[in-house]
Image (cartoon, rainbow, N blue to C red):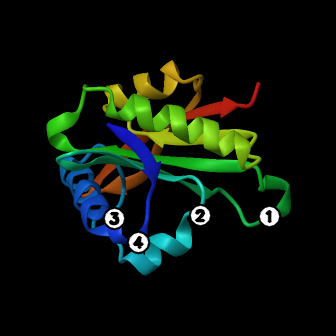
């Protein structure tokens, strides 16, 4: 497996993995995969990563800005998704390790993630890479007619 920069040509596989996360119900509040143009406009150019092997793309990771205000220029929101058939095989770890390294090289000083508490594997992945739980946002939004909580995790450059 290698981790490398995502390109527009990867969007077909990336969007399929994103759709798996949406369908699972514990990865995102999104209800449909956005177009490439919408996704591209909402994520920073670097880092945008894919993990791949000979079978294709296994997962992806990217950052979005938390605010357009200059004082938050070094704060990024993490998105990380792993394909259904390869979860628990180190794909998330490889992506997160490279995402952290590249984000620091790009000048990010804080990474944050908002994760459903039911997504225990994602919470553990973040914690293994230096994130700490800074709070729980109760009933932050509704999904399919029910209130959902999220766990807010944060990682600071050391």
Q: Position of residue 85 (x, y in %)?
A: 14, 38
What residue is shown with label 3? 10
Q: What label sits on residue 45 in the rendered view?
A: 2
Q: In which quadrant is the N terminus drawn?
A: top left
Q: Position of residue 71 (x, y in %)?
A: 85, 55
Task: From this view, report whether residue 79 is shown above or below residue 149.
Answer: below
Residue at 72% in and 49% down:
106
Sooner in the amino-acid sequence: mark 2 or mark 1: 2
Considering the numbered disc 1 on the image, is that residue within a helix, a strand or a loop? loop
Q: In this view, does 8 lie to the left or right of 110?
A: left
Marks 2 and 1, how far apart in space?
18 Å
What residue is shown with label 1? 69
Cβ atoms under marks 3 and 2 closer than 8 Å: no
Considering the numbered disc 4 on the image, is that residue within a helix, a strand or a loop? helix
Tell me the crowding category of disc 3: few under 14, some 14 to 19, or many 20 or more residues within 10 angstroms, Cα based.
some
What residue is shown with label 4? 8
Marks 2 and 4, how far apart in space?
11 Å
Residue at 76% in and 49% down:
74
Task: From this view, report whether residue 77 is shown above or below residue 97.
Answer: below
Cβ atoms under marks 4 and 3 closer than 8 Å: yes
């Amino acid at each position: 497996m290698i981790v490398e920069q995502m390109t527009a040509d990867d969007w077909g596989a990336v969007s399929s993995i994103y759709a798996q996360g949406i369908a699972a119900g514990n990865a995102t509040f999104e209800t449909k995969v956005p177009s490439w143009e919408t996704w591209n406009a909402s994520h920073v150019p670097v880092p945008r990563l894919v993990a791949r092997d000979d079978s294709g793309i296994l997962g992806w990771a990217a950052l979005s800005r938390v605010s357009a205000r200059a004082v938050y220029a070094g704060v990024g929101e993490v998105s990380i998704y792993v394909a259904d058939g390869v979860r628990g095989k180190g794909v998330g770890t490889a992506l997160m390790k490279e995402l952290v390294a590249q984000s620091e090289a790009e000048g990010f000083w804080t990474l944050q993630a908002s994760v459903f508490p039911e997504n225990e594997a994602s919470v553990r992945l973040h914690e293994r890479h230096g994130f700490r739980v800074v709070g729980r946002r109760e009933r932050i939004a509704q999904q399919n007619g029910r209130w959902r909580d999220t766990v807010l995790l944060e990682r600071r450059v050391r």
